[in-house]
Image (cartoon, helix red, strand yellow):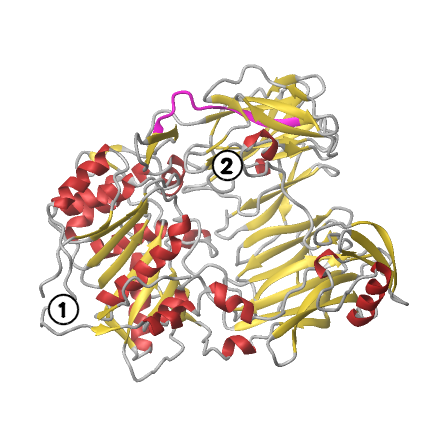
Amino acid sequence: MTRPTVRFLSLVGANATANALASALASVLAVACAVTSAGAQRTQLTTADYDRAVKMLGQNVNTLVVGGSVQATWLPDGRFWYRATEAAGATGATATTVYLVDGAKKTRTALDNTKLAAGLATASASTVTPATLGYGTLTVSDDAKSVSVDVGTKRFTCVIEQYSCAASGDAAGGAGGGRGGRGGGRAGGAGGRGAAANAVPSPDGKRAAFIKDNNLWVRDVASGAETQLTTDGVKDFGYATDNAGWVHSDRAILLWSPDSKKIATNQQDERHVGEMYLVKTNVGHPELKAWKYPLPGDSVIQMIHHVVIDVDAKQVIRLKMPADPHRGTIGDNITMADYNWSPDGSQLVVASTTRDHKASWLSLADTKTGEVKKLFEEKVATHFESVTGWRVLWGTKEIVWYSQRDDWGNLYLYDLTTGALKNRITTGEGPVNSIVRIDEPTRTIFYTAMGREKGQDPYLHHLYRVGLDGKNATSLTPDDGDHTAQLSADGKWIVDTYSKADAPPVVNLRDGAGKLVMPLEKADISKLLATGWKAPIPFSVKAADGKTDIYGQLFRPSNFDPSKKYPIINNAYPGPQTGSVGGRMFSAAHGDRQALAELGFIVVTIDGRGTPGRSKSFHDAYYGAMGRDNTLPDQVAGMKALATQYSWIDIDRAAMWGHSGGGFITADALFRYPDFFKVGISESGNHDQRNYEDDWGERYQGLLVKGVDGGADSYNVEANQTEARNLKGHLLLAHGTLDDNVPPDNTWLVVDALIKANKDFDLLMIPNAAHGYGAASNYMMRRRWDYFVRWLLNAEPPKNFEIK
């Protein structure tokens, strides 16, 4: 078969290297013909075909799911209220109803919208109807005897028994809050630019801390007066710096003490760290963007010096411990989840992690003297990650710690004073994945875990309760589905929402022991089904080892015909920090997977070995082999198994696409399995971990070792450009030229290798786009559809179709 030559879809030079490559490419540009090697004319897809796909995008189908959601606002006595969206008649309209729920009496009482609107109309001397009533501003009083709601510029309070209303002040202007929902929150700065936007408020709300000229300042909220707290911060060695290379901002990374008198933060040393450069495309002289961005194998990376600041005294207390590598126990950035204050601010527990993530430990600091005591350390052979985070129980001087030491993520109780292990809290298979609440008076912990309900998909989340002594473990949400739970303050009531990919949300009220009290809501998807929408098919197949069960989802077009043969497209993400499928809860769109299927494809997602959510050994399956494995053996095995199970899958027309890590695996797939994958779209891939942020590669590949692999280094064999010579199929590479997460040099390395190997490929560089493509996202989606239509369906897409 005669294949088309290289097509240069779009390119704007972002630097000298890009311009040189563009010149090299220019000599081999040609437009691919729309005729196969046999000379047969391609079939033509129409605008109507693409319109059908667009109708399955989130913005068009999400509104077709009505109800099935409860955001509880708890009242002091354990009752709660919520707003429900419900279908209103046969016209497709919806209406809002406010319900008051009393679990003890098993009652669910609706406010009378008609009477409420009439009472408000009378009190405000204006027109108010149930349809125009400001439900988003409505709140219920603590005794549930009255409600307050905005009408125009005024707020009115109405006694529920008579629905008599009277003005009670100025309009609140926003959704009503309350003691809601899931409880708790995270400290940290807001996004945006400028000191004001990034200031971190103190718990008492009187002061706010922010960065100015590399130093930390506080502003008095009432007066606006600003006070400088540190004076020795300089460029690249400032306080509360938010820069991990791949993510960076102006926000301050710090944690106030509970009494609002002290701040825990760090001084980040990146003075000798290497820089990353990007060039903005514009008319005239280009704009150079440069910032500190360490890479695997660099001799110097960012180091953090832990400090405590006494705000009133303007005193900096440096903790007497060595500077830590810029590493965290959760994810690949520094967060304040690795700091924990005592209630009186006299002590601080700090987590430290080695550069390679193979060890983490906790230290207890005296915040007056800076003296530090190491408590305990966890060491692993691959990489440690505290999925749930850790908690300090200051009242009993204990620590709740997460570990996978027995191959499963479980919780352990340590002594804060001695650092000794007291007992296991949770046991068994199926990883604990979040700590929901710790009730210290009753010594009970509520947590979520996966894979603990027999006969269910192991990725489904469920809520559990157990004593801190490890006794009396109880499953609180056993129904088959992916659960989220809202607990009352006293732990006596649970609002349980659950669903699956093929089962819409159901909301029930349970008591604190998990017993069903009463149903609350169920999503209505009748309008969604009327479009021809089909739920994805959850499936389980064997991994490449022939033993391990792996799971995924399969999407079909709404006009699916089992007598036909459909090409198969794998939308892949190899991890290791997440997987391909994503959440198992119900969704109408699942990104654009269903929309893509509408064009005549079977679209699948598969979580192969090497992704999280299972055992530690499952997650570590390809540790140190990010390119050679990359879950690809399991992706191929899964696709072949599905083709054996379903005769309507044409396994000879197999393709893959993905973004970021998905872009990495896609190019990898076409290079390492060139006879299996015929088409691939690789978007913003981190093709060579030596050109991506240090924390990623060093966590999952290990530290870079030189002088191996024939004199190269330990990362070389994993890099996509080293296998580019194997390309046989159709490959589209795409990248944003201002991608500060995965720098575009990752794609340029692959482009360079493909040119040197004299390979045909397609390239789309999106000028000034970051990692997510921004305004060009729909354009990229359309080009993705076009590419698969052209090379998998052997058809022509409608010209210049616009997704809106």
Quadrant of residue 192 in the image? top right
Image point 60% across, 28% down: which residue? 210
Q: Would you call the spot at circle 2 few (<14 residues within 10 Å), some (14-19), or many (20 or more)?
A: many
Dot placed on the residue nearer the N-terminal end, 2 or 1: 1
Q: Which residue is at 55% across, 26% downward? A: 266
- Tell me if residue 409 comes above or below residue 45 in the rendering: above
The image quarter containing residue 87 is bottom right
Please name whichever residue, 572 or 764, is drawn nearer the observer in this view of the structure.
764
Q: Secondary structure at mark 2?
A: loop
Relative height, residue 545 to residue 699 (above, below): below
For label 1, count other residues whose C-alpha is less than 10 Å away and answer few (under 14), some (14-19) or many (20+).
Answer: some
Provide the residue span drawn in magenta: 263-275
Q: Nearer the viewer, mark 2 or mark 1?
A: 1
Quadrant occupied by the C terminus: bottom left
How far across and how far down the image is residue 8, in percent?
A: 20, 50
| Residue at the (53%, 21%) spot, across then down | 213
Amino acid type assigned to the residue bearing label 1 in the image: Val
Badge number at residue 328: 2
Q: Which residue is mark 1?
A: 35
For this view, does 182 lie left or right of residue 762?
right
